[in-house]
Amino acid sequence: MQRGNYMNLPVQVLREKAVFTSGILVNLITPVDDNHHAFYDEADFRHRLLIEKMRTQRYKKSFLLLMVDISKLMLKREREETLDRVKTALLCSVREIDMLGWFHDRHTIGIIFTEVATQQSTFIESIIHKIYDHLCKTLPLDLINQIEIAFHLFPKVNSVPLDVECDSGTV
């Protein structure tokens, strides 16, 4: 089976999509069946993050940056398969208006949750639980325990330790 560049998925489930943003033409590889989500490389993701920060400053709309540190998983023998499973779980956890990609190449995946209402304190908790639920469905508990999640709410910055339960135990 021929594989594409994006998440090592078969070529027949990928499509190239050109996006014109801020005067720059960006080619994205996106899954055909994934609600048009793209997984940005580090440079493109950081560019999207900068645009979102500027939008937040101008329009006073908050967004959440969630960082999923998978560096310990990248030391494992089946790292590409594990990475594919993590990406799949994360893609199932985001809305159509959210963006995800490499925040720190091959170590930390970033997810930008746009249009976040700051008065909804349960939003962050529900997002993290949703991500862990999807990870629990795709990875064994010993691998999940090696994933670290941090978040920053813009313009206000927060970070908290997590005690989240999966079906198989506490993470």
Image (spheres, rainbow, N blue to C red):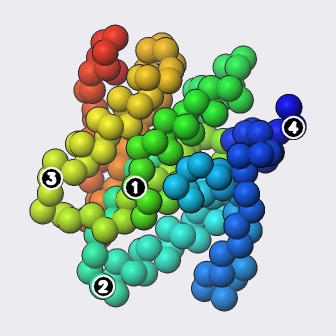
Query: Pointers 3 and 4 in contact (CB under 8 A)?
Result: no
Task: Please say if 39 is above or below 52.
Answer: above
- Which amino acid lies under the numbered mark 1 shown in the image of this protein? Arg
List the residue tagged with mark 2. Answer: 59
* Among numbered discs 2 and 4, the one appearing first in the sequence: 4
List the residue tagged with mark 4. Answer: 2
- Tell me the element at label 3: helix
* Among numbered discs 3 and 1, the one appearing first in the sequence: 1
* Relative image position of residue 69 (x, y in whole percent): 51, 38
Q: Image point 12% across, 62% down: which residue?
A: 119
List the residue tagged with mark 3. Answer: 121
Q: Image point 65% across, 50% down: which residue?
A: 31
* Among numbered discs 2 and 3, the one appearing first in the sequence: 2
Q: Image point 72% across, 51% down: which residue?
A: 14
Is 38 situated left or right of 77 in this image? left
Query: Pointers 1 and 2 in contact (CB under 8 A)?
Result: no
* Among numbered discs 1 and 2, the one appearing first in the sequence: 2
Is 85 situated left or right of 117 in this image? right
Q: Quadrant of residue 113?
A: bottom left
List the residue tagged with mark 1. Answer: 95
